[in-house]
Amino acid sequence: DKMECHAINIFEPFIAMANNSLVNLIIPAVFIVLMSDFPKTDGNTMFYIQRVGKLNWMWGQLLFSFMSIITYMTSIAYISFLIIGNKAYSRDVWSDLTTDYVQKFPQEKATLIANMINGRLYNNVTPIRAFIHTFLLSSLFLMLVSMILLAGFSAGKRVLSMGIVSAVIAIGSGLIQTDGKVKWLFPSANSMLEIHFDKILRERVVGLDISYLYFIGLIVILFVIACLAIRRYDFAKITDMED
């Protein structure tokens, strides 16, 4: 190895993965596969809906989404910690591998390892703050995905909601590579911490508070829509097969 293995921060692998445009596409894509039958229903659904009520059932789906997302994101973070094991430190300081690699090995400027975490991040935020914001923004992205699926189910348009989610993720991931402002209309850009900062100047292109409000606002709106739509949903039509 050209640099010592112990010179890496334990939070950096997760930060690097979640701020990579390809992984930013893969994380929600895998989540969609895992949640493809959300909300899960069967022939018994009608009976416990009569007991708990539709609105309580919806809050239960919201809680299930939250716990699923926390489990999923925590698993990804835990795996990233295991990758480097006891060869890393946990201080709130960026490693030499991140900040000095290109300076020490300029001939490898275009390689993957040299671009895992760039100056947009290490010049503007500390590792722990980057980890927290990355975890939260990615989790909110997945919660938005869940709410689209839940709203689609409530409106009787489950297949359509899957198509909308897939299109939003695919288009948003593609727009991340552009410099236009239209990318900020999609969750992919708002969930990627790195592109919130300028490439050269130590300043934000888009405030993190705007991205948090973007996610929270859409999640609330979609959940309200789902709650209104579920009032007209006929659970009696659900058989032992999934709806």
Image (tube, grey):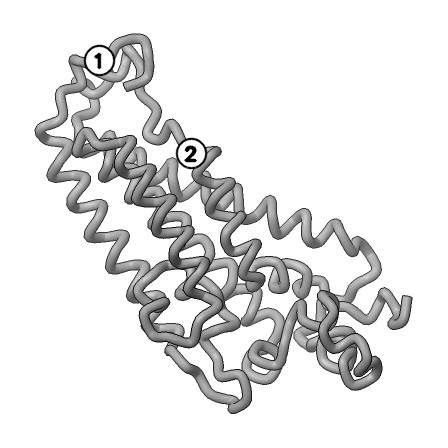
- Numbered mark located on residue 47 in the image: 1
**238 versus 127 height, above or below:** above
Tell me the distance, in whole angstroms, between the alpha carbons under discs 2 and 1.
Answer: 23 Å
- In this rendered view, identify the residue nearer to me: 160 or 41: 160
Residue at image coords 31%, 8%:
240
The quadrant in which the C terminus is found is top left
Residue type marked 2: Met
Residue 167 in the image, given as x and y percentages of width and height:
35, 48
Residue at image coords 42%, 51%:
170
**To which residue does mark 2 refer?**
35
The answer to which quarter of the image holds residue 236 is top left
The kind of secondary structure element at disc 2 is loop
Residue at the limit of the structure toward the left, as seen here: 232
Q: Earlier in the sequence, mark 2 or mark 1?
A: 2
Left or right? Give the position of 176 relative to 110.
left
Residue type marked 1: Phe
The quadrant in which the N terminus is found is bottom right
The answer to which quarter of the image holds residue 35 is top left
Number of other residues with Cα within 10 Å of mark 2, as a class: few under 14, some 14 to 19, many 20 or more: some
The answer to whether the residues at label 2 and label 1 have Cβ atoms under 8 Å apart is no
- In this rendered view, identify the residue nearer to me: 188 or 141: 188
Residue at image coords 63%, 63%:
16
- Numbered mark located on residue 146 in the image: none
**193 versus 34 height, above or below:** below
Residue 222 in the image, given as x and y percentages of width and height:
22, 48
Residue 41 in the image, given as x and y percentages of width and height:
31, 20
**130 versus 79 height, above or below:** below
Number of other residues with Cα within 10 Å of mark 1, as a class: few under 14, some 14 to 19, many 20 or more: few
The answer to which quarter of the image holds residue 189 is bottom left
The kind of secondary structure element at disc 1 is helix
